[in-house]
Image (cartoon, coloured by chain):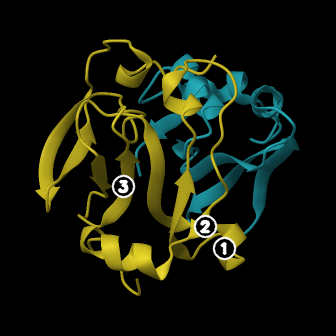
Amino acid sequence: MIGGNPNDFLNRIYSCQDTIFIYKGIKYWFQGYMPDDSSVHMEVTQYEPSNDREVWRYDATTIDECWQAFIKAPFFNGKSFWEIEQDIEWVDY
Amino acid sequence: MGGRGTFAAGNNTPYSYQTVGKIGNVKILQGIGNQHGLPESSHSSAAYIKLKPDGTFHEMRFYNKEHVLYMEIAYHAEESLTGNRHTPILHYHMYDDRFSKNNTGAFHRSSAARLTEEMKAKYKKYFKGVKNI
């Protein structure tokens, strides 16, 4: 990972805080939140260039379930996080 | 899991931010090295601001007397509020105590909500460069 440590990045994902990263020249935005006391939502959207297509979203009953889904999701050309983490740049904006 | 070990959690971790300015009495912070975002808890301040490289408002976080993060105001797209993924909008999320006080386990971060008129009036001086507040 460029601009950070992949384990720190995954800790950040677990915390549901807004997280911005670049992969193959496209900037993505991650966030998570709890719509109510019994559900968790996580999502990745394309941030720049802006695009209304859905990249990834997951709804579950626990943070851990969503987090595991993020790690396993093949949302980058069929590849999952650990397969491409060395090409991901973690940025602030 | 979680990695939220901070001052509020009782861990004296090194502070990885520098103050690069102020708006009113609120410090504008910038992460040092690979530190991203704003702190999950504060050392002493009641709020911190983060600006984008062009100087416009990006995010503001609010902390209670226990140094615990309880609210975050941000300016970016929120599909749940605008119906699209590209129109930026001022909005806020609320955090419960468990977020800053624990390194692991469950916590609550609320869905994005529009700022109330009262919040806009109270905080607009911090929203540098944001049009159509």
Q: Residues within 10 Å of mark 3 (few under 14, many from 20)?
A: many
Q: How many marks?
A: 3
Q: Nearer the viewer, residue B49 or B62?
A: B62
At x 40%, y 41%, the residue is B37
Q: Dot 3: what SS?
A: strand
Name the spot of residue A28 as percent of width and height, x first: 59, 51
- Marks 2 & 3, CB-CB < 8 Å contact: no
Pointer 3: what residue? B60
Q: Which residue is mark 1?
A: B81
Chain B shade? yellow
Whether tag 2 and tag 1 are in contact, CB under 8 A, the answer is yes
Query: Is B40 located above or below residue A35 in the figure?
Result: above
Left or right of residue A3, residue B103 in this image? right
The hue in which chain A appears in the rendered picture of the protein:
cyan
Number of the label disc, if any, that sits on residue B113: 2
| Crowd rating for badge 2 (residues with CA inside 10 Å; few <14, some 14–19, many 20+) | some
Q: CA distance from mark 2 to mark 3?
A: 15 Å
Q: Chain of mark 2?
A: B
- Number of other residues with Cα within 10 Å of mark 1, as a class: few under 14, some 14 to 19, many 20 or more: some
Residue A49 visible to the viewer: yes
